[in-house]
Image (cartoon, rainbow, N blue to C red):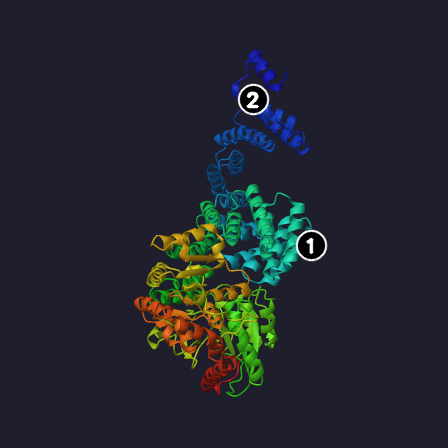
Amino acid sequence: MGFFERFQKSRAVSGLSAPIDEAAAKLEAEGLVQKGMALELQDRFDEALICYDEAIQLMPELARAHFNRGNILLDRGDAQLSLSAYLTTLKYKPDSAAAFYNLGNARVALGQPEAAIDNYRRAIALKPEFTDAHIRLASLQHMLGQLDDAAASYGHALSLDAGNADTHLSHGIALQELGRIEAAQESYCRALQIKPDFAEAHCNLGGIKKKLNDIEAAVACFQRAIEINPDFAEAHSNLGNTLQVFAKHDEAAKCFQKALELKPDFAEAHLSYGTVWQHFGELDLAEEKYRRAIELKPSLAKAHMNLGIVLNLSRRFDESLACYRRALEITPDYVDALVNLANVQKDMGQLDAALATLRRALALDGNCIQAHHNLLFIQNYLAEHPAKQISGDARRFGEVVTRQARPYTSWPNSPLPERRLKVGLVSGDLCSHPVGYFLEGVLKALASQAIERLEVIAYPNRVCDDATSQKLKACCAGWHSALGLSDEALSQRIRDDGIDILLDLSGHSANSRLPAFAWKPAPIQASWLGYFATTGVPAMDYLIADPWTLPPSEEVFFTEQVWRLPETRLCFTPPHVEINVGPLPALTKGSITFACFNNLSKMNDAVVNTWVRVLNAVPKSRLFIKSQLLAEPALSQHICELFTSQGIGLNRLILEDYGPREEYLAAYNHVDIALDPFPYPGGTTTAEALWMGVPVLTLAGEHFLSRQGVGLMANAGLPDWIAKDTDDYVARAASLASDLPGLAQLRAGLRQQVLASPVYDTKRFAGHFEAALRGMWTQWCSRNIGAPLQL
């Protein structure tokens, strides 16, 4: 018989008074609670529960018994019964911070986060120094995406216990997700000061270092995390991602393989492994990996985005668009997905849609450099886009990169006008690329005729190891990869190398490093060759142009001072292939073949309408369009519809994919006249067409880019092939096409003519180019002679 039953029986017999009975019940109830607590220390939880139940029978208002009972139930996973126990506890002891705290824990287990947050707040209100409550509150706020509140709660917890490494780690994660990168880095470092072998903190610090472009430090952090915990799959995967920045793709692949051995269902590692296969051009394997990542984690937006990239590279544009849109359904503010979506829209000729997408990206993240680059680049394709708009957008980009930099204002370079100069080249295209083709002959000429006066050092921003890059490298005194270097680190390298004049050869095209120019690492900086509008970067001193392409009236739209070479800003290197110029095709075919081998993105509505007029003005003529995107059936069909909708039959169109460069050049032997698009005319394609004996009909625009064809044709000695407007363009096409003997004669001697012209005469151009660099330097020296040298 239990005490409660004995107590009831004795009471009935003896008639003891209630106060004496209650005192005895309280005494035994409290004794049962003490016994239960002792049993808990021995892990005898069932017996402890019996004690608490008996205590509650004796004294229902004994809050401690309800509380302890709730703790055992919660530990056993019976959250609902524990919740009831804590509520009863608070009924009898409403000022119990511990009961509110554990009630919050029970609500978390029951999937009631908002109510749990309220419970934790009540606990803290009762006990402000309740560190664990602050931590649990922060963790829950973090889980719910209430990042500002979470960061504040972690901060409160750390103000009470600054020695908790785990809390510093969690605080850093919240700060990082808020974009407070420097503060997050400090939190991870504090965690490591407390706990030096904290693998997770090393790993997270590595992520911060990578985001700050301190790639070597990031690698060291991930390697340290792996050294501490060799089975840390996330660290292996992160190390692989970071090694890829250095183009160490084989080593990265091993990291991803190890991560997947440790954790086969690691969706992010499958995703990263796909990027390796993508780099190696194994698009099928990359696609397989991305799809596996999506299968494992359908909400992984980046996997959908990367799959979209592979499908785009595979020219499956509609599928690619669907992937980007799915990524944006998952993460509506996914700026990278918007940027890539815009790229596909551009490739498909949807230029207005592409610009709208990029402006949406910039509305979400005004500091997104790639979105700025692409916005500026795409605007050049549009016929009616005002120069003022492009200039304004470029200046906004310049403001962004200037805010992110700490520009140098003095340099250690000796201001002696006649000394040997160090010239730096920064580009992502020092390889078999139009920039490489225009640069090769010029560098070779400078190396042979100006070696005593100029020393060229290159800073390629991607892996360059093809025939063209090897030739460029042979002409340089130094070849230092910019891959993996932060803008600050690259700027410091350029400054340490003593560069006097730094040339940007990319502008807003792919693989640009314009943000590094905002640091002003060299006393003179100039934009040349790879771009055709203002960079918008205030630290860019000059833009190199020529008398033909940039009218003085347009200089107001440039942040740079315009420096004009005397003849041309472009000088092409003859292709290294043995292809003879064939006879005029029209002599045997009996009809004219017009052609355009430019990027399809240049074919805006105005261009198509004008070409339709040309075809109508020249009976039986055909239009030969050659582009790498025409392997995509849907795009070929779209191009056909643009012309058939205006009455041009399919028999008058020839559509071909690019193919190898030699085959591409040989295709000009099937062309009589090349038609330049506008307002974005050809550069490389025009120079190559001329070398193959094919004259190019170009339209004179009003702006720098739109006059590129004017500069090439004027310097090639073909002024009659420059039209003043679209009516003149059509009229000249018809007139020139009607003179087959004249065309045949021009074709026969055109290669020799252009090889002797400024368009191909690299030695002559190199002399002009060297004089321009020396002129810039002399002006700088005149402003700095007598100034103290700075270290």
Instruction: Pick whichever, 281 or 728, lies toward us.
Output: 728
Q: Residue 663 location in percent, x, y?
A: 54, 63
Question: Is 96 positioned to the left or the right of 535 in the image?
Answer: right
Q: Residue at x 35, y 76 (%)?
A: 551
Which residue is at the front of the view, 199 or 344? 344
- The spot of residue 7 in percent (x, y) is 59, 17
Callout 1: few (<14), some (14-19), or many (20+) C-alpha neighbours within 10 Å?
some
Left-right relation of 512 to 286: left
Question: Nearer the N terminus, badge 2 or badge 1?
Answer: 2
The image position of residue 372, as x and y in percent, is 43, 61
Q: Is residue 533 visible?
A: no
State which quarter of the image contains the N terminus. top right
**Type of amino acid under label 2:** Gln
Can you say whether 8 is above or below 229 in the image? above
Q: Position of residue 383 (x, y in %)?
A: 35, 63
Judging from the image, what secondary structure is the residue with disc 1 in?
helix
Nearer to us in this view, 699 or 250: 699
Tag on residue 227?
A: 1
Q: Which residue is mark 2?
A: 57
Determine which quarter of the picture holds residue 188.
bottom right
Q: Amino acid at mark 1?
A: Glu
Q: Is residue 90 above or below residue 488?
A: above
